[in-house]
Image (tube, rainbow, N blue to C red):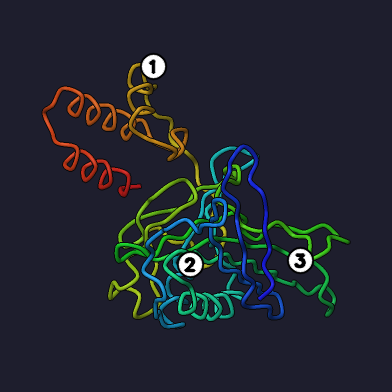
């Protein structure tokens, strides 16, 4: 099978992509990291069988928020209704074919008609894998407008080292926060047997909302939260979360809680977004 290899600057590892699906508007790669001639062991729960209808319900429930030019934010579906079914079908196939050391890279182009002719194109890309009983999905581009003349074969592939986009995922049980653009999804949850919506859902439409002002966070609190946040995107956290992270870090440093208890408490805190 033809492999696509891209070098990552400043790192000995390289990304190897194995294209497995090329349909009208939907391209899927199986992605692994290689150091020298050795594939990096990831230990994902692949191959995995997830039904297309369940994945449709999951993708249909995912929403994002992005800043509005006029202030506040805009909440909208991450996946346009027209691409949910073909994307879910392709993702189901890919998860069933992936090895424990491969994640799934998905690229979807939506074509929008104007005056009865497909004219405008919009790009959605993401990475996905299953681990510890959860489906992890990292969004890279969401309905991104493609300028005329943009060659489809040269579109950017979803990458782990991409710079964070100007949007963040909306989370809530069973779609848990795992980073500004990443969700930890309890994909076996009974909620996904049928169409599911998070509280405050847009019901498939864009919705504008105002952002309430929050009390300022002290430098000490922000520094402590930074020490415990890894690469979760500290600028995306609320003042309350920053202070709670700082308290957890202080308890860990003082020996009042074990590392296991700290990681569990931190995980639960970041889920409540």
**Residue most extreme to the right:** 149
Rendered location of residue 160, percent (x, y):
55, 50
- Among the two numbered marks 2 and 3 on one chain, the one whose residue lies closer to the N terminus: 3
The residue under label 2 is: 203
Q: Which mark is residue 131?
A: none
> Quarter of the image containing the N terminus?
bottom right
How far is disc 1 from disc 2 in space, using C-alphas?
A: 39 Å
Query: Around disc 2, counting alpha carbons within 10 Å, would you say few (fewer than 14), some (14 to 19), or many (20 or more)?
Result: some
Q: Which residue is mark 3?
A: 121
Residue at the limit of the structure toward the top, as seen here: 219
- Check whether the beta carbons of the residues at disc 3 and disc 1 lie within 8 A of each other: no
Name the residue beneath numbered marker 1: 219
Res 183 → quadrant: bottom left
For discs 1 and 2, the disc positioned in front in the rendered view: 1
Q: Residue at x 78, y 75 (%)?
A: 113
Disc nearer the start of the sequence (3/1):
3
Query: Residue drawn 36% across and 17% down?
Result: 218
In this rendered view, identify the residue nearer to me: 69 or 256: 256
- Judged left or right of residue 9, residue 180 is left
State the SS at label 3.
strand
Secondary-structure class at tag 2: loop
Coordinates of residue 190 in the picture (x, y in percent): 28, 76
Q: Does 122 sit above or below residue 246? A: below
């Amino acid at each position: 099978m033809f492999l696509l290899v891209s070098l990552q600057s400043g790192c000995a590892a390289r990304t190897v992509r194995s294209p497995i699906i090329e349909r009208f508007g939907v391209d899927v790669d199986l992605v692994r990291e290689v150091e020298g001639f050795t594939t990096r062991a990831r230990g994902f729960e692949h191959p995995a069988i997830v039904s297309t209808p369940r994945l449709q319900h999951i993708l249909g429930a995912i929403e994002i928020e992005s800043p509005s030019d006029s202030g506040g934010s805009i909440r909208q579906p991450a996946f346009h209704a027209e691409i949910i079914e073909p994307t879910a079908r392709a993702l189901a196939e890919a998860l069933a074919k992936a090895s424990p050391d491969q994640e799934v890279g998905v690229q979807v182009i939506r074509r929008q008609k104007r005056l009865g002719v497909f004219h405008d194109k919009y790009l959605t890309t993401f990475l996905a894998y299953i681990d510890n009983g959860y489906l992890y999905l990292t969004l890279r581009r969401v309905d991104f407008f493609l300028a005329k003349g943009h060659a489809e074969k040269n579109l950017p592939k979803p990458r782990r080292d991409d710079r964070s986009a100007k949007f963040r995922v909306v989370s809530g049980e069973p779609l848990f926060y795992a980073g500004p653009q990443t969700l930890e999804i309890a994909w076996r949850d009974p909620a996904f047997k049928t169409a599911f919506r998070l509280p405050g859902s847009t019901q498939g439409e864009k919705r504008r909302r105002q952002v309430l002002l929050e009390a300022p966070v002290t430098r000490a609190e922000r520094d402590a939260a930074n020490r415990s946040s890894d690469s979760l995107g500290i600028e995306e956290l609320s003042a309350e979360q920053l202070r709670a992270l700082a308290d957890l870090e202080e308890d860990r440093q003082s020996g009042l809680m074990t590392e296991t208890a700290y990681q569990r408490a931190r995980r639960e805190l970041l889920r409540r977004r």
